[in-house]
Every structure is written in C-alpha cells, then in structure tokens.
Image (cartoon, helix red, strand yellow):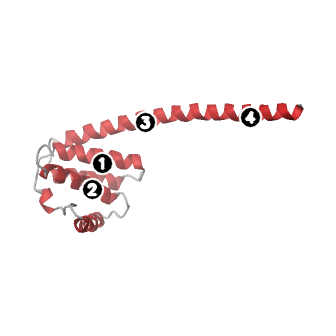
C-alpha cells in the first residue's frame, strides 16, 4: 500500500511541475511577444520617419550601417532590421535603385540575385549570413513597385 501511495505522490508532483512550467512558459511567451511587437512598431516608425526625408539608397545604406553595428544576430533582430528597411523604402524617394538590382523571377535570376547580394555585403565588409537577407527586403520592395496595381 505504501508503494502505491508513493507512485501517486510522484505522479502528482510531476503533474504539478508540468502545470507550473506551462504557466511560467506562457507568461514568458506573452512578455516576449509584447516586447517584440513594441520593438517592431518602433522600427517601423523609425524607418518611416527616416524614409520621408531620404532616398531609397540612403535607406539601404542606413540599414547596412545599423546591421554592421549590432552583434545581435537573432531572428528577432533580423525581423526588426527588415521592418525598418521595408518601412524606410516605402516612405523614401525613389532614386532608380531598383533598376540596378537583379530580379528574382526565375531560378536562374534568383541564383544571380543571391550571388549579387553576398557580393554587396562583402563590399561593405559584412560576411554574416544575415546580411544578404537585408537585400531580400529590397528585392521584395522593388518587385512590389513594378507589379501592376491590384496584383
């Protein structure tokens, strides 16, 4: 009988620990998500504000300069960088930048764009994997600008 009671106690302790872990994890996730949303909003506002007074090339240069200064290469940081750059580009004055960027409308063009983006990062002294992802934002924005309205 004593061993049956011990098993029940162990099961109850495990269930209680799992419940506590779930509550703690949920609260952490809520705080982290709230922080990410706030940071994303700040990056969006900063990008839009800058973009209203500069050309699209200056948006890209600023995004690269910010990328070079940070040592944080987390997914959250990459998302923030992308939000900043996209909002800056959308608010900026066009300067013909999209005319010089390889398209990504086919596999061959995508490979050319990938090599081009790595080279652009190398020219700026950046060799991390996140750097070329900034240029994906530029490619997307250029594609959005050239698509017919309503597509």
Task: Report the mark closest to the observer, 2 or 4.
Answer: 4
Q: Position of residue 94 (x, y in %)?
A: 11, 50
Mark 4 residue crowding within 10 angstroms, few (<14) / some (14–19) / many (20+)? few
Q: Residue at x 14, y 49 (%)?
A: 145
Answer with the quarter of the image where residue 52 lies.
top left
Cα distance in 3D space between marks 2 and 3: 24 Å
Residue receiving disc 1:
82
Q: Mark 3 and mark 4 in contact? Answer it, CB < 8 Å.
A: no
Q: Residue at x 22, y 52 (%)?
A: 140
Q: Position of residue 79 (x, y in %)?
A: 35, 47
Left or right, 50 with respect to 8, comes to: left
Cα distance in 3D space between marks 3 and 1: 17 Å
Q: Residue at x 29, y 44 (%)?
A: 83
Q: Position of residue 40 (x, y in %)?
A: 33, 39
Q: Quadrant of the N terminus?
A: top right
Mark 1 residue crowding within 10 angstroms, few (<14) / some (14–19) / many (20+)? many
Residue receiving disc 3:
33
Position of residue 141 relative to residue 102, above or below, is above
């Amino acid at each position: 009988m004593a061993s049956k009671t011990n098993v029940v106690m162990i099961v109850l302790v495990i269930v209680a620990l799992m419940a506590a872990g779930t509550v703690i994890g949920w609260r952490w996730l809520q705080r982290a998500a709230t922080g990410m949303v706030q940071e994303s909003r700040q990056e969006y506002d900063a990008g839009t504000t800058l973009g209203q007074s500069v050309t699209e090339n200056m948006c890209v240069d600023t995004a690269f300069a910010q990328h070079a200064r940070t040592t944080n290469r987390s997914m959250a940081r990459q998302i923030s960088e992308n939000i900043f750059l996209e909002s800056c580009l959308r608010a900026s004055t066009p300067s013909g930048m999209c005319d010089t960027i390889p398209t990504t409308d086919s596999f061959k063009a995508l490979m050319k764009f990938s090599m081009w983006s790595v080279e652009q990062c190398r020219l700026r002294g950046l060799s991390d994997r996140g750097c070329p992802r900034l240029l994906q934002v530029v490619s997307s924005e250029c594609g959005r600008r050239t698509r017919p309205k309503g597509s």
